[in-house]
Image (cartoon, rainbow, N blue to C red):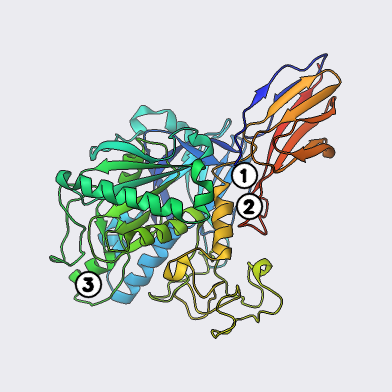
Amino acid sequence: MLLLVLACSRPSENVTAVPTGMPDRVAGRVLTAQLAPGLVTVHGVTAGEVWIDLDDPEDDRYGFQYAIEDADGNTLFERSVVGPTVVASFLDYWSQESGFDILGALPTLGWFPLPIPILEGGAMLRLRVRSEEGVYLEQGAFDLSALDNPAFELPPSEAVVGHQLVAGTGTQSENKLDLVIVGDGFVAEELPAFATAAYDIAEAFLAQQPYASYRDRINIWRVDAVSESSGIAYDCIDGCHALDTAFDSIYAIEAVNAFMGTTYDSRAIFQADQWAVAQAVAVVPWDAVLVVANTPRFGGMAIHYATTTLYPDYTEIATHELGHSIAFLGDEYTGDFCVRSESLGLPENITDDPANPPWAHWVDDDVPLPTPDEDGWTDRVGAFGPAYNCDDLYRPRQHCQMNDYGDFCEVCAELVTRRLHRFLDPADEIRLFPEGEIWQALAIGDPQPLVVRVDGEVVAEGLVGTMLDFPRPEGAELTIEVQAESRFVRDDQGDLRQTATWALETP
């Protein structure tokens, strides 16, 4: 694990080293947005800052895309996320199935948190939804100057009565994964039970690989929120009815059953007040959120936040759901209804092309593709069907945390690790010692490849933890690259490689 410190003294003679380009992570804000048919709008911003990863300049994998432009229309940042369009597709499927307009009855289900970076020169936020033809269509825009208006900031959550660090140091949030566990449906006297559940979940999460290998780079917080009612709406244990809870968690399909007299079965549980969760967790740094819903009924989901109930296996459910929200993993089972849209795309652990899966680098040459569900192959990485609740889709392993719990398979562990490096960049802080004709660079941490380039040419290479000497560059760009290594990763696609860059100016 790397622990690097940035220090840049003034070089001798007439060459000055000046950091240039965008850093890997910057402070950001969380907007409250609303997705409706053909329209995306922004309604406010929560208190507090978050840290936003900037590694990928272009991103078109998922169904909802947002971009920040400068005053001249140049794109400074672009990112796609799966949450808003998953909600829209899920609700559209069930609305058509039941004949009941779920989003019309519960419009707050279309509200969602949107973390955006605060970038110098950022002027306009573009909001886009991908069509069935794979084309992003702009459906809204937001003038970022509104962030300077105090009236636009939403008030802190009145439901929050306290918070506590459960695991980690609570420091260096700009270079760590900050996970927040918050409860819904707990009245004041039930908060001790929530605290116990949060501790159990944190321990189980940190014991699971690959999180265990990054334990010292993860902070886990508990946020205590008090609800007026105990329980979760429409869990149908003591009756199928609405409740007054902090975030209005609800079994949405059970609500449809109550209104329509249907008998559909689904474990899906939402927070109807999605933006209220963002307001609540703003009291601490956060990158990912798990909501613990106070009901013993089986249930969970991960859209904008992960959710688990207090079903007996809640620590396993929590780890599974966080696999969705942290690593964007897809379900590898077929226990629910197949809700699929070309506009959504597919998670990287799911494929519709079993002969050439995205995880081919994990498949041995003797494994047939698609892979038979029989002895001899079930303990190998292949392409097993079905998956993602769809008969024509495939998963990498017969058994996995994203299917029937247990450990993450090799493919999912790699994806989790790659995503973790969005939060803990190994080159965020580097020591640079410019002295005369010979300069030196130092990164402190576990031995990993370290390369120094001037104008793209390698001038020094070695390992993290050693001092690298290189000739004094003049009128050039200096780049220092750290290539993190992990036993969980065979193809990092650049996620584990980070750089620090300086412009070398000659007066």
Q: Which mark is residue 441?
A: none
Q: List the residue tagged with mark 3.
A: 257
Would residue 362 be seen by someone viewing this image from the given angle?
Answer: yes
In primary-sequence order, the first of circles 3 and 1 is: 1
Label 2 secondary element = loop
Label 3 secondary element = helix
Q: List the residue tagged with mark 2.
A: 486
Residue at x 64% of width, y 46% of height: 57
Query: Which residue reaches farthest top?
Result: 13
Q: Are marks 3 and 2 in contact (CB under 8 Å)?
A: no
**Looking at the rendering, in which quadrant would you find the N terminus?**
top right
Residue at x 48% of width, y 53% of height: 326
- The residue type indicated by label 3 comes to Asn
Judged by depth in the image, the label closer to the viewer, 3 or 2, is: 2
Q: List the residue tagged with mark 1.
A: 55
Gap between marks 3 and 1 measured at Cα: 44 Å
- The residue type indicated by label 1 comes to Asp
Q: Position of residue 11 (x, y in %)?
A: 77, 17
**Vertical order, 265 against 437 (above or below):** below
Numbered-mark total: 3
Is 212 in front, or is 484?
Answer: 212
Q: Would residue 8 be found to the left or right of residue 243 on screen?
A: right
Gap between marks 2 and 1 measured at Cα: 19 Å
Judged by depth in the image, the label closer to the viewer, 3 or 1, is: 1
In primary-sequence order, the first of circles 2 and 1 is: 1
Gap between marks 3 and 2 measured at Cα: 47 Å
